[in-house]
Amino acid sequence: MNGVWATVIGSGIFHGVNPAMGWLFAAALGLQHRSRRAVLMALPPLALGHAVSVMLVTTSAVALGLLTHTVHLHTFMGVLLIAWAAYHHFYGHRQRVRVGMTAGFVGLALWSAAMATMHGAGLMLLPALLPLCGAGMPVGSSLESVGQVTAVHTVVTLTTAGAIALLAYQYLGLGMLRRGWINFDWLWCGALTITGVLLIVTG
């Protein structure tokens, strides 16, 4: 279980650092309104949207796992991750969800859910969930574990994104993205691909 929670927490940190998961939006809102409160108020709906997206993917994976053999699930999930990485690399940049800077709670939550889904955020948690996806596992126990995984992952993502958003608003500004930020699209696609390959090999 240590490996499971390390995956959950590590992916939460990775998602929180990624500008596409919301901290960039929160920092931009704070700079636009010149208010730290605007930064903080943007974080809950962003976290909610992310959690909803992750929950939909993870519960679907568990439901599929209850109907199939684990070895087949490993292969299927691995191929899905690699295919999603390829799609995101070649076509993901064309699918931009546009939300105005005056978006409210609902708008931010919907934007966050759409971005998390398009980037395959929930898919990155599949290695942690596979032990819960085997045929014969109790449904109630599996869903409870999925809820715990989603909750911990969301808290870690929110904490990481909030810290970076406040740092960008208070000290660094958004110019740091031009000066020294890494290309997260490439890193994201690489992480999805490596995870998919490992699932197939270890299946």
Image (spheres, grey):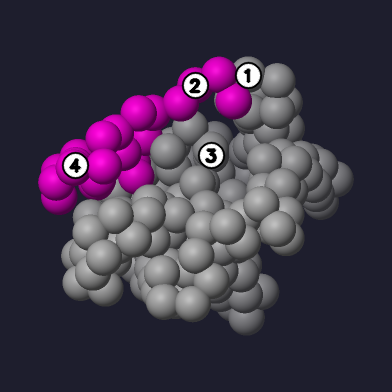
Dot in front, 1 or 4: 4
Question: What number is the disc on residue 68?
Answer: none
> To which residue does mark 1 refer?
91
Q: Which residue type does callout 1 highlight?
A: Tyr
Residue under label 3: 120
Question: Which of the labelled discs sits on residue 95, or is there none?
Answer: 2
Rounded to the nearest angstrom, the CA distance separating label 2 from label 3 is: 13 Å
Kindly identify the residue that appears in the image at 15 percent across and 50 percent down.
105
Q: Nearer the viewer, mark 2 or mark 3?
A: 2
Q: Residues within 10 Å of mark 2 (few under 14, many from 20)?
A: few
Q: Are marks 1 and 2 in contact (CB under 8 Å)?
A: yes
Contact between labelled residues 3 and 2, with CB atoms less than 8 Å apart: no
Q: Which residue is tagged 4?
A: 103
Mark 1–mark 4 Cα distance, whole angstroms, equals 26 Å
Q: Hey, what amino acid is under mark 4? A: Ala
Residue type at mark 2 is Gln
Image vertical order of residue 57 relative to residue 141, above or below: above
**100 in the magenta segment:** yes
The secondary structure type at the circle numbered 1 is helix
